């Protein structure tokens, strides 16, 4: 008789904990996120001036035009084209530093950058661990200023303040390098050149 009572108690406890952790807690977190952090809770989706989604500020994407700053290369393949929502999955190539295929890819990337007038920096030739990094270092952005300015018929003095404006410091003030979000920077350039009505 006591075994049945203990089993019944255990089942009730499991059901109560399931309701708390699988239903109530997630609903509370969704509510808190929607009320206090709606932009972040909904994927940090950025929109252009026409109200169309242009991408997430949290996930990198490919920018192919000369008028745009280039992102880090990705082994998982960002969606192609400016304005396309990224659909890549997270992951690295897992190639060892001694792997000839990795060296070949890096040399090819560096050569492509030099051909279009960009001084290769580490984050413009190496992929990030996740393959989805939306940031480049300030040095990588500055290496691209002249090419972007020429393509947009602007002076470098018009673009450099935008890099400073969208610069993010080190994580917790000590980890990593100062970075620039590529999507935010490219969008700011598009807004800068949008004709005023």
Image: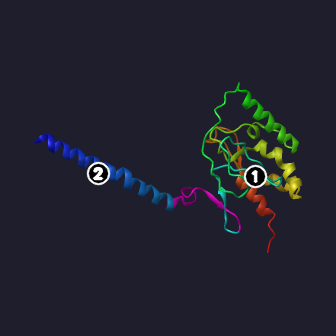
Q: Which mark is residue 16?
A: 2
Q: Secondary structure at mark 2?
A: helix
Residues 176 and 87: in front is 87
* In the displayed structure image, the side of residue 40 where residue 63 appears, left or right: right
Question: Who comes first in sequence, dot 2 or dot 1?
Answer: 2
Q: Dividing the image into 4 quarters, which one contains the N terminus? A: top left
Q: Locate residue 54: give its quadrant.
A: bottom right
Q: Is 171 above or below relative to 185?
A: above
Residue in the picture at 71% in, 54% down: 183
**Magenta stretch contains residue 193:** no
Q: Residue furthest bottom?
A: 197
Q: Residues within 10 Å of mark 2 (few under 14, many from 20)?
A: few
Give the residues drawn in magenta, as a range.
Answer: 35-49
Q: Residue 144's x, y, as percent?
A: 82, 47
Q: Residue 150's x, y, as percent?
A: 89, 54
* In the displayed structure image, the side of residue 161 where residue 84 appears, left or right: left
Q: Locate residue 67: give its quadrant.
A: bottom right
Disc 1 marks which residue?
Answer: 63
* In the displayed structure image, the side of residue 190 where residue 40 appears, left or right: left
* In the displayed structure image, the side of residue 183 where residue 115 appears, left or right: right
Residues 116 and 152: in front is 116
Residues 145 and 177: in front is 145
């Amino acid at each position: 008789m006591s075994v049945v009572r203990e089993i019944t108690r255990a089942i009730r406890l499991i059901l109560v904990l399931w309701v708390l952790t699988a239903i109530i807690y997630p609903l509370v977190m969704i509510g808190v996120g929607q009320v206090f952090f709606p932009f972040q809770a909904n994927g940090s989706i950025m929109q252009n001036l026409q109200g169309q989604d242009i991408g997430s500020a949290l996930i990198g994407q490919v920018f192919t035009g000369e008028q745009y700053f280039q992102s880090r290369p990705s082994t998982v393949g960002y969606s192609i084209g400016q304005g396309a929502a990224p659909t890549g999955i997270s992951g690295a190539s897992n190639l060892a530093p001694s792997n000839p295929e990795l060296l070949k890819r890096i040399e090819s990337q560096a050569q492509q950058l030099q051909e279009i007038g960009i001084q290769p920096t580490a984050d413009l030739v190496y992929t990030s661990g996740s393959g989805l990094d939306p940031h480049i270092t300030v040095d990588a952005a500055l290496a691209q200023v002249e090419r972007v300015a020429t393509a947009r018929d602007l002076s470098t003095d018009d673009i450099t303040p935008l890099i400073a404006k969208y610069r993010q410091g080190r994580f917790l003030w000590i980890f990593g390098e100062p970075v620039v979000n590529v999507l935010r920077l490219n969008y700011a350039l598009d807004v800068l050149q949008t004709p005023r009505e």
